[in-house]
């Protein structure tokens, strides 16, 4: 199996669309105000947003976007008005991560892991 897409909820899909376009995702389906779909700039995965009337705990998720130029990307996004809850930081699991929230308080983690993303030293054989 291969991951095709991730879909998140939003109370305002139009606003969420602009946020994710700032992050660098390419809009490929626009059915506002109820749905949009993006291509990621790297790889084959896609990302969708669908409308809900109200966000709830069951709507919240965490999205991970990998970027080989993490620190430069964070600086560039900050110049576009994107606010981060934590700056890029090396983690004990060998990833470098920066954290932020989207407009609906979904958690996003931009990270750089390289080979350790799928092959950390503690990988099960």
Image (cartoon, helix red, strand yellow):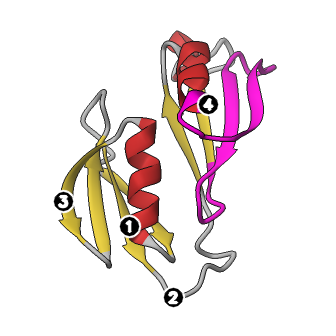
* Relative height, residue 73 to residue 55 (above, below): above
Picture residue at 40% right of the left edge, 53% below the top: 18
Q: Quadrant of residue 70?
A: top right
Q: Is residue 125 visible?
A: no
Choose the circle earlier in sequence order: 3 or 1: 1
Picture residue at 61% right of the left edge, 15% below the top: 71
Picture residue at 49% right of the left edge, 71% below the top: 10
For the residue labelled by badge 1, is the local secondary structure a helix, a strand or a loop?
Answer: helix
Choose the circle earlier in sequence order: 1 or 4: 1
What residue range appears in magenta?
78-107
Other residues around mark 2 within 10 Å, as few (<14) / some (14–19) / many (≥20): few
Q: Quadrant of residue 32?
A: bottom left
Q: Quadrant of residue 44?
A: top left
Q: Mark 4 = which residue?
A: 78
Q: Mark 1 = which residue?
A: 14
Q: Mark 3 = which residue?
A: 29
């Amino acid at each position: 199996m291969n991951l095709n897409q991730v879909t998140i909820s939003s109370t305002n899909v139009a606003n969420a669309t602009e946020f994710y376009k700032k992050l660098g995702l390419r809009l490929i389906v626009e059915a506002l105000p109820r749905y949009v779909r993006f291509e990621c700039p790297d790889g084959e995965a896609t990302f969708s947003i669908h409308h809900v009337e109200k966000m709830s705990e069951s709507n919240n998720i965490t999205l991970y976007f990998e970027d080989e130029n993490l620190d430069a990307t964070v600086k560039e996004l900050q110049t576009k008005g994107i606010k981060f809850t934590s700056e890029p930081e090396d983690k004990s699991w060998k990833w470098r991560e920066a954290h932020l929230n989207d407009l609906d308080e979904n958690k996003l983690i931009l990270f750089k892991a390289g080979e350790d993303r799928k092959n950390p030293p503690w990988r099960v054989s």
